[in-house]
Amino acid sequence: MESGQARGSGRFGAGAAPVVVPMAVMLATGLWGLDRGGMWGDESVTFQVAQRTVPQIWRLLHDVDAVHGLYYLFMHAVLTVHPGEVVLRLPSVCAATATAGLVAALGVRLAGPRAGLCAGALYAITPMTGHYAQEGRSYALVAAGVAGATLLLVRAVDAGGARVWWPYGTVVALTCVLHELAVPVLGAHALTLALLRVPGKVWSGWGRAAGAVALLLLPLVWVSQGQSGQVAWLVSPGWDRVGRLARNFSPGPAGPVFWGSLLLMAVGLRERRTAAVALPLLLVPPGILMTVSQVRPLYHDRYVLYALAGASLLIAAGAGRVAGVLGRVRIEGRRVRAGGRRVRAVVGVIGVLALTVTFLGQLPVLRQDRSAAHRPDNLAVVSALAVSRMRPGDPVLFVPSVGRLAALAYPKGFRQVRDIALRESAPRSGTLWGREATPGELRRRLAAVDRVWVVAERSALDPRRSRPDPVERTKLAVLATEFTVREEHVHEERVRDDVLLRLYVRRPPGDIPPGDAPPGDAPPGDAPPGDAPPREPADVRPPGVSAGAPALGAPPPP
């Protein structure tokens, strides 16, 4: 089989340009609008957990978020430099930049410099990439690890020998410890080896590396199984999620760009070596997680961000094959060589124009994505409301308790108020947002105040919703029977689900409406319930933009 280096040799793309250019594009895109003026819930978890001491982080991981343990420890070191929103997101920007370069390097090795440049650039301009490049979470880092491991796999297959598998196994292990749902990449790599028809010696080396990774991950998997309540909000994906993922993996979610991308991917399947690497990476991880999720929901678009590299490689391979066909057309009755200077120049100009037009077409989506209001929530808004309305010493009640993330991420707005439900702080209790008082103790605390500020999403105050946590039921029961709303404030940007700041005042004596307590209210003296199952802050609704790339251009779900 003709090597990618042989087919891609020549002046075009010689040297480091096929790798450096996509990295530059990705870095510029990632840095653009990085300080969007507010963290959303998941980012705030990273921010506040990473600023705890190492023993406090270690204690937290025994009960919740073990799957993010390595990431939190890494971010602990990063935020030691400067605890700020830009620094929080910089590792993701750098990881996305590295991934664009690794995808380009893969393309160069598999199909030549032109295909590598195209693959890396496609990855860099895809809106889903830009979205997670600006999130203070681990997904961009996992994507970089998978791309690096895939490149090491290809090199190991080409080089042979036992020693070449150690770097591969190390990178895969670190990536899977960073987030255990990267494990399906091993299935993708196994299929790649099968499609390449490698000899038994290669299978033996890969098998030892994969086995070592599996043994290393067993303790993490064991611990995380006991913390499965963290993803209890996920649902089994249907065919609509397949279509959504396909659009998210495209450099354009609709119109000619989307359909053209699908066509080029189909053409790219003719490039057997590239397809053997890209197609399993594209299909196997999402396929495994979606299949498992029919029994136990584990799938989310962001968990398979790393599979996007396969789409970019296939599209680039298809574009390269089309360019090769165009290079063999007759011009003025004479056949022009595919590698001729004129053909290379024309094809290069067309390719650059196509990528530029695609990128410019996505600028409105990328610009919108750089607004804090485009994320599931904006905790800076909540803190700003608190600063403008609350008085020193005012009691505040978070409904549900996860709303306390606003105070943990932006303490300025809550520094002089009293968290009336809090029993033990988050760092001291080894939880994400602290332990609250028992229902009986909470009733006694609320009985001692005549006014209380409530921070809540509007849906959290809906009396029709069932609440398994007795503390949350007690909050709503007491508010409904003993207090009435005097003020309500919502930030003018109207963040998703309307985070409210309400002032409740005590009802006059004899004005307590009978039968208003929500059903199932816990009697005083109940045992402490502990934390509610850890969850994503957006679990009261279908995940919003952060459930995938913002390229879909669809309005936020209700």
Image (spheres, rainbow, N blue to C red):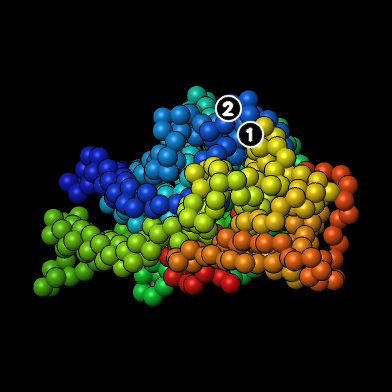
Q: Which residue reaches farthest left?
A: 332
Give amino acid for label 1.
Answer: Pro
Crowding at dot 1, Cα within 10 Å, few <14 / some 14-19 / many 20+, comes out as: many
The reply to whether callout 1 and callout 2 are in contact (CB within 8 Å) is yes
User: Residue drawn at (17%, 70%), measured in percent from left and top?
Assistant: 330
Using the image as rendered, state which of residue 58 and residue 503 is in the foreground: 503
Q: Position of residue 3 (x, y in %)?
A: 35, 44
Residue type at mark 2: give it.
Thr
Q: Quarter of the image containing the C terminus?
A: bottom right
* Residue 165 appears in the figure: no
Q: Residue furthest bottom?
A: 255
Q: Earlier in the sequence, mark 1 or mark 2?
A: 2
Residue at x-position 40% and y-position 59%: 371
Most foreground residue, 244 or 231: 231
What secondary structure is marked by label 2? loop
Residue placed under numbered mark 1 in the picture: 427
Q: Is residue 510 left or right of residue 75?
A: right
| Residue under numbered circle 2 | 53
The residue at 86%/55% (across/down) is 522
Is residue 397 at least partly visible in the picture? yes
Q: Viewed as shown, does residue 321 lie left or right of 138? A: left
| Residue at 34% across, 66% down | 364
x%, y% of residue 160? 47, 31
